[in-house]
């Protein structure tokens, strides 16, 4: 299934953040493998949150995976 920004946001909204390693693996398994020709950056914010940035022809958006502390 090809993702859209809405389907990714739906997945993130129902996702329970455990830690960086687990989130990275889950994002690879549930989002990255189903969205070709896109760039990805996942990492921490300065205030303890985590952001997923996706750039490409279908999705070009930042997603908050974990809100800032």
Image (cartoon, helix red, strand yellow):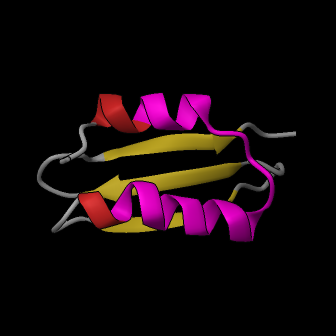
Q: Is residue 43 visible?
A: no
Compared with 7, 29 (above or below) is below
The question of residue 23 being in magenta is answered with yes
Q: Nearer the viewer, residue 42 or 1?
A: 1
**Quadrant where the C terminus lies?**
top right
* Apparent side of residue 26 relative to residue 60 in the rendered image (left or right): right
Compared with 14, 56 (above or below) is below
Compared with 55, 17 (above or below) is above
Q: Is residue 35 visible?
A: yes
Residue at x 65%, y 59% (from the top left corner): 23
Q: Position of residue 53 (x, y in %)?
A: 44, 55
| The quarter of the displayed image where residue 5 is located | top left
* Apparent side of residue 53 relative to residue 61 in the rendered image (left or right): right
Magenta span: helix, strand or loop, mainly? helix
Compared with 42, 53 (above or below) is above
Q: Nearer the viewer, residue 30 or 64?
A: 30
> In the image, which residues are magenta?
9-32
Residue at x 35%, y 55% (from the top left corner): 54
Residue at x 63%, y 38% (from the top left corner): 15
Q: Position of residue 21 (x, y in %)?
A: 71, 71
């Amino acid at each position: 299934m090809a993702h859209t920004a809405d389907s990714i946001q739906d997945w993130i909204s129902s996702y329970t953040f455990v830690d960086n390693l687990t989130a990275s693996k889950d994002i690879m398994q549930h989002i990255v493998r189903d969205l070709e020709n896109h760039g990805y950056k996942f990492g921490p914010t300065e205030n303890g949150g985590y952001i997923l940035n996706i750039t490409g022809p279908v999705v070009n958006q930042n997603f908050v995976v974990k809100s800032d502390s």
